[in-house]
Amino acid sequence: MIGKRHRRQGDTHIKQINKQNKCPVKAGQFNNYKLNKMSRTFTFRLLFKWPVMLLGFTLLPCCCVIAQGNRATTGKTDSRLGETIVKGRVSDVAGPIAGANVAEKGGKNATTTDSSGDFELAVSGQGAILVFSSLGYNSVEMPVNGRGVVNAILQAGSGNNLTGVVVTALGITRNKRSLGYDVGQVNGEDMNRVAQTNVLNALAGQVSGVTVSATGSNPTSSVSVVIRGIRSLNSDNQPLFVIDGVPLKNSLSNIGVNNGNSNDVDYGNVLSDLNPNDIESVSILKGPSAAALYGSRAGNGVVLITTKSGKKSKGLGVTLSTTNEAGIPYHYFPNNLDYTVGTDPYTTPNGFNSWNGVLVDLAGTNTYRFGTPLNQGLNAIQWNSPMDANGNYVPLPMVSHENLKNFVQTSITSTNSISIENATDKDNYRFSYSNMANQGLVPTTGLSRNNLSLNIEHRMNSAFVLTSVINYTRSSADNIAGGNDGVLKDVVYLSPSVDVRQLKNYWLTPGIQQRKALPPVGEDQSPGALDPATNGDDNPWFILNQVKNGFLRNHLYGNLKAAYKIDSHFSAFVRYSQDLYYENRETKMSKSNNSEINGYYGVTGITNSESNTDFLATYHNTFLKKFDISASAGGNVQYVYSSSQQIYSAPGGGIIAPEFFNVSNISQANIRTASAYYQKAVYSTYAMASLGYDDLAYLDLTGRNDWSSTLPAGQNSYFYPSASLSLLLNKIFNFGKDVSLVKLRGGWASVGKDTDPYNLYGTVGIGSFGGVITQSLSSTLKNPNLKPEQAISSEAGIDLGFYNNRLRFSGTVYESNNKNQILSISTPGSSGYTGRQINAGLVRSEGIELQLGGTIISSKDWKWDLSVNYTKNNAYIMSLANGVPYFMFWSQGPTGSWTYAKGQPIPNDFDSKGRQVISDGKIGQLWDNQVATVTDKSSPYYGYPLLDNGGILQKASNGDFQHKIVAGDFNPKLLMGVQTSVSWKFLTLNANFDMRLGGIFYSQTYRYMQSDAALRKQENVGIPIPAQYANNIPAYLKSNPGKFITINGFQYFHLVGGPNASKGGLPYNDNGNVIFPDGAFYPGVYSDGNGGYVENLGDPNLTKLDSYEDAVTNGPWSFGRMDMFDASYIKLRELSLSTQLPAKWSKAIKSQGMSFSIYARNIILWTKAKAGIDPEQAFKYQQGPQGNGSQFSQGIEYYNINPWTIPMGVKLNVRF
Amino acid sequence: MKSAKRIATVICVFLTIIIAGTSCKKFAVLNSDPNHITPAEASPDYLMAGVLTQTATWYGNLGSGNMSGAMQETYQDAFNSIFSDYEWDPVDWSGSYATLNNNKLLLQKAQAYGWNFHQGVALVMRAFNYGNIADYWGDAPDSMALNGDQAGLQNQFPAFDGQQQIYTRVIADLKAAIPFFYGTINTHGEVTDATKASDVYYGGDPVQWRKFAYSLLLRYYMRLSGKMNVQSSVEAIADSVLQSNTDNCLMILQGADQQSSYQFCTKFNGPSGYNRNKMCGTLAMKLKSLQDPRIVIMAEPITTPSIVDATKFSAGDNTTLAIIQNNVRYINPAAATALQYKQFNPATYSQDRPYGALATSIWNLYDTSSVYVGIPISYTNYTDFQYNINGSGTQAYSLSDYVSYLRRDIYDNPSGPLLWQTISTYSEICFDLAEAALNGWNVNGTAASWYNNGVQASFDEWQVFSSYQSDVNNYYGCVKDIGTYMAQPSVVFNNTLQRIIEQKWIASWQACNEAYMDWRRTGYPALTVGWGSYRGEIPLRFAYNNTELQNNSANAQVAINALVTTPYNGPDGGNSSWSKFWLVQGTGKPW
């Protein structure tokens, strides 16, 4: 019964099933051909014959359900039973449907399709009627009519998001109803509606429980995907990405790579190589029970990406697509624009910043603002002052310039692709080419990408199928703006008195010395000889054009799979997959760059390869009519190899000849090299069984054992099982006709995890001190007894559908317990090591995900879909190692984030009754120093800030770790996403909102800029003193000490004063010769030296004044709170309007159809904090504080000052 | 059955493909680190090189950096409130313990190989580093330290030893080291070419190491002399210490990269680091008062000297503070008084700019005393870069025509004939012995002779009357030869400890670690602080850093509780830089 080829013969009969739609139906004639001819004629067929053949097979799959049968073959009658065996395949527009029901109408015979969508059913006779059904699809009835092969194509019903089929672990297509766990789904269309340079951005807000965040808004910025929150304390928590069965390396380790001093670069994650146009669907396996079969790396979930395969095509099967997008900046970081940098007071004859009574602007040599006020009609000798006839520099008006605005450009992204696809019964193929060209917001930056993809399937006979997917991507960039420390920082620090546009001619001496915004040098003209070689900030245009970080990555990934269907019950496949890339990076810095004054040159070559060879044998059968069993067993061999080699010039060493960037141009003494190699292997076997009963209950069991090379012998084998159950209550109980689905599901899984290579034994590093060879022990203690980590998780959920699934609800609660985490913790340096690896602890992650969707309107012309998702996730440290009370995520200056394990007392935290608060272990605290205050409760000044002798706020207890206090929590109170789609006839409007409420973040941008007085808000932060209190400020402050004196909350601590008299500045003599109205003070008291206190509240005889610019820059290095912000935001992330263009238009160019859409991103961005920082970027990549490898620190942000843009684009799709 | 057979065939074929397609390597091979060597493979020579360079870099950078500021020899303006305003943050000692951990491996290997020289070096370096930890922090883990690789909470969280116990072990280690250096380089077969290259202090010479070990003993005996009787100990070793400048324990700066170069040179840093590192008024005025020629190797003359000259201004003009003519700046005394300016004078400095006073009641200062001008200590919290009426001073680049930078042709270099990290010098030894002799101890010389030797050694060390004689001759403000210098009443030995320590202080230029220890022990030189000082006194110790407090809190708290608080602690609590540890408790010094 194997190997019969009868259904490939003869003509094909096509019968129209759909009675409402008058679909054009054409019958075609297939030619007979033999297999051995195939290879010879393949090319011919590919180019000509198949499209022609398939013209006769035309259908509009979106509106028709058709069935095809083979008239030439009659059903075979089983002589023993007197029954007829009917075979066939059930598919939808995307391909075969696994698990579809096939039943004989009115009879007892029923079966479900296998993973290839194929079925075989004994029916009572040749006149039987088959009923094809699958949840999420409209049922179809088809008479057998004596045929032996009956194929059915099902049309998707409404509510596809809740039911329908999804791709699950190992690429197995399953009916969503049969799953005991939640799988997030995004179809390719949703990923593609709006162009993204990194396709992962398109996942943002689409699926509950999935957090997508970009490190920045540069085209090469890495994108982090975290599913169901932090689970592991020692990794970047990135899920495993599997593309057509190929696991792809996706670490965030390409960020912060230092190439020369102060040149951190984000090279982006490798997943940005994906071409969005090739994506058919994305499945997100959130919980370990879904992902258990993927093993170690699936602990953080799995993102399964299925690329498009060839489909039957009307016409040529050619699709052309073009997307063009412009990102127009509209919102700029609010920096101080009203004062030039410089030192106050800004002018008096013979005073400061002046020369012989002429004001000189020293903008290029200073960082503090609150120098000369701008736009006040003042003139000064500036860097670009011309010389008059007498040889004197001419003072020019001091006016401000919006340099950030004047520096950036509109970003443009253009994506053009072509795909050719087609399918026959024997073969299908899809070839695509895509080119993406991006011009960044920052001039000279951008990204270029070329993708080639080939997806072929060949059915050699009815049993043996070969498939292969091969993707090649070439990504490159001539210049990546150097991470967050990039050129925009130079721009924002440029004095607003300097117009950045006038600095474009950036060479003073080409190749040798950049031009800086320094005042002209002259013995009688300027206050000092300012040598551009040693003074002044970098010219942004110089950085842009002469500090170049380029890369080129050749990335090849794909697989070859041979599947063999042994009989109707047994099938098996073997597959080899490879993910391989070579990346070359090159950094060039010209001489006179401030951080590398002699220039820099460095090249890095990176090789990364991962191969997986796996096989899977599957058995599928039905028993007793109602039981359906599918069991599989398989194994995998994973081998990973990576290496990197770097050649670069020593710090400060630089290059010899200017502007010649080659390794030969580094002197022998200054050449530095580095190399590193990593390899690891994991061998695995696994098995799974899926048992279904009468389409109302499904039980899934899996088990897997891994052997990892990275763990010590004896500990390197670990087994983990999972189980999940799905119950369709609506099939058991009758809830009435309005209830279409009531499903309960639950899952439990355990997943083991290994570690990185070479994590067992301490090492000695070889270094050099000058020319002397040195050897030193690693400062992190490794652990030769590491055990595998174990994550045990469980989830339960309910799915409901009403009114034929027009109203859909899905809810999931989950908990995950990660045990034996392999953690690096910090240890006292006096133990000889600053960190050690432990194998302990329990981290619990728990949460709830809700999704509510509905088709609100569905009429002939109108359709309105709305979907809302809600996510809440909390992570807890339940226990750590003995003697380790807390775990630190990051620390930065005065602040940091660390969490005490459950049960540990939290220092300095007392409840209302004064009792020590015991930690519940919840992760999220941001800590800060305490402000020293008067602690003597009997003092009238109790609670007042205790100032130092300069009148400055002091840290309590020297900023000791044990005396810090919790300033806030970075966890959001609410995360919600809303997707909506409105269609009217051929027009569709899609919108994607999301919002976050609650939680705080710490802005390092604000800390740095505040300490240089470069923030706009610093222009006026003094407490306004009412006129009647002008001569009695202390009385006013003491009238409301809680508001004016004692310290609570965030932002600026209380300050009285201003940069000038009109803004409340007090008379102050800082430099001796000028009394200038720029005095300010912090309200509080200072010690009188004898145990008493002196009021620092504004009495001119007692108060320690400071210049405003000094006072306003104090604090951020001692206290974090003034740079912490509420992270709430609401975004209208995407808005698109798409339309199918009228048929006569497409016919005019002989196309099969044209669609057109316009879209915009980030149209609304509302932030509560109004700080000019996108809270979504309020996290920061870092090497783990304890050497934990790469991490995303939550609740902290660093120089996300790219202007906000509203990218707008148009997209045109034409099918031929 | 047919299908079962087929299944078996298919599985066999698949397994064959898998096994053939993947080279199954042994896990142990796969997981052996190709990027590093193991401790077993480490070489004692290169471990020693690491220990010596790390130690010298840490100690030397402190001596020419923060301690130089604390002892008022140099001044860092604009940003650095730690350096000259004494706003000391807690200091992390992890680097010292990391060095000690490497040293521990060195000692273990040297013992295993029976290599005497390396054992001796490891013992000296253990003593030296623990000595520093006790000197700067006080109580610290010692007997329980460096055991983090062993099981047990007592090893992961080391208890602190008392400062006194640490000093006891330092002395024991130094004594234990000395026998390993018996003989000469020719009798030490373990000293190979690799050893000589790795010994960046003495090139593998055990004789010099022996003298150095004795000198460290002398240093620590003198350190403890206020707390215990060390007379016989000192007398016993007085012959064995460094004998001349050729015995000095120094690490020559290689200048190959940032870490092996002079820390403030602009070749590997932005210019602001070098620009900010200026002369401090305390030392500059002292040298001027002694007509000391050593200033020519320290400082760069100011670009524009100043003169107070009323004749350059029209009568009654009390607003024009200064004018510049022919590269000389003239200061108008009438305007200066009106604008509350006066000449810097170290004797009246603490009254002119009293610590903690209101800004309105202080005098601003200028300095017309010399072409060498230093900034008075803790001059302001912030605008000290404008000192000496420097209107064009900027915070970012700290340029000044009116204050002395360090001598540019010496100190703005990665390496050079006068650039090294100083561990110990002959002049220090001479002054130690002078102090011992002054105490009446028998150290083979009088206090005067050791004092004179010490001054002479310092002049020799800095090549003042050799390589730099012409610069000496060109500077009007100094004597031209050593004899004249020594004969001055302000220099000639007057049988006081103060004079010994003052000269020792000057001799510790760019290596102020011992000067700070001496000041703490003796109160000399008598130093005051200025208006911008953080707490009104010079701090006494480094506060324990958060790396220890957060990871070893219970043990650290015991040590903190043992500290004696002072009125200068402010809101710090016990773990303050102004708390007193055992060494200064009950001595009445320095303040």
Image: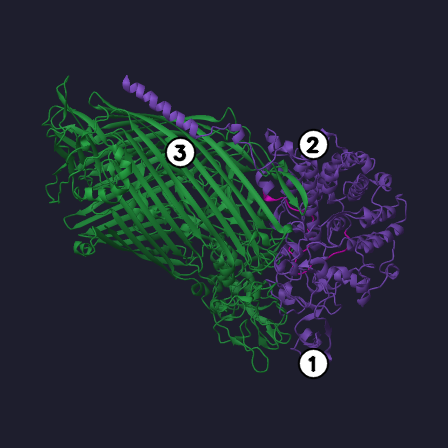
Q: Which hue belongs to chain B? A: purple
**Disc 3 vs disc 2: Cβ atoms closer than 8 Å?**
no
Give the class, few, some or many, for how many residues have Cα within 10 Å of label 3's Cα (few <14, many ≥20). many
Q: Quadrant of residue B476?
A: bottom right
Magenta part of the protein: which range? B523-546
Q: Residue at x 40, y 28 (%)?
A: B18
Q: Residue at x 55, y 74 (%)?
A: A381
Drawn colour of chain A?
Answer: green
Residue type of the residue flagged with mark 3: Ser
Q: Amino acid at mark 1?
A: Phe
Q: Which mark is residue A816?
A: 3
Whether residue B378 is visible: yes
Disc number lying in front (2 or 1): 2
- Residue A789 point in image, percent of width and height: 46, 31
**Which of disc 1 and disc 2 is earlier in sequence?**
2
Residue behind mark 2: B109
Magenta span: chief secondary structure:
loop
Q: Secondary structure at mark 2?
A: helix
The chain holding disc 2 is B
State how far apart marks 3 and 2 are (Cα): 47 Å
Which of the pair B341/B153 is nearer the observer? Answer: B153
* C-alpha distance separating marks 1 and 3: 83 Å
**Chain letter belonging to callout 3:** A
What residue sits right under mark 1 in the picture?
Answer: B313
Q: Position of residue A118 (x, y in %)?
A: 23, 30
Q: Are marks 2 and 1 in contact (CB under 8 Å)?
A: no
Which quadrant would residue B417 be assigned to in this image? bottom right
Is the N terminus of chain A in the top left, top right, bottom left or bottom right quadrant?
top left
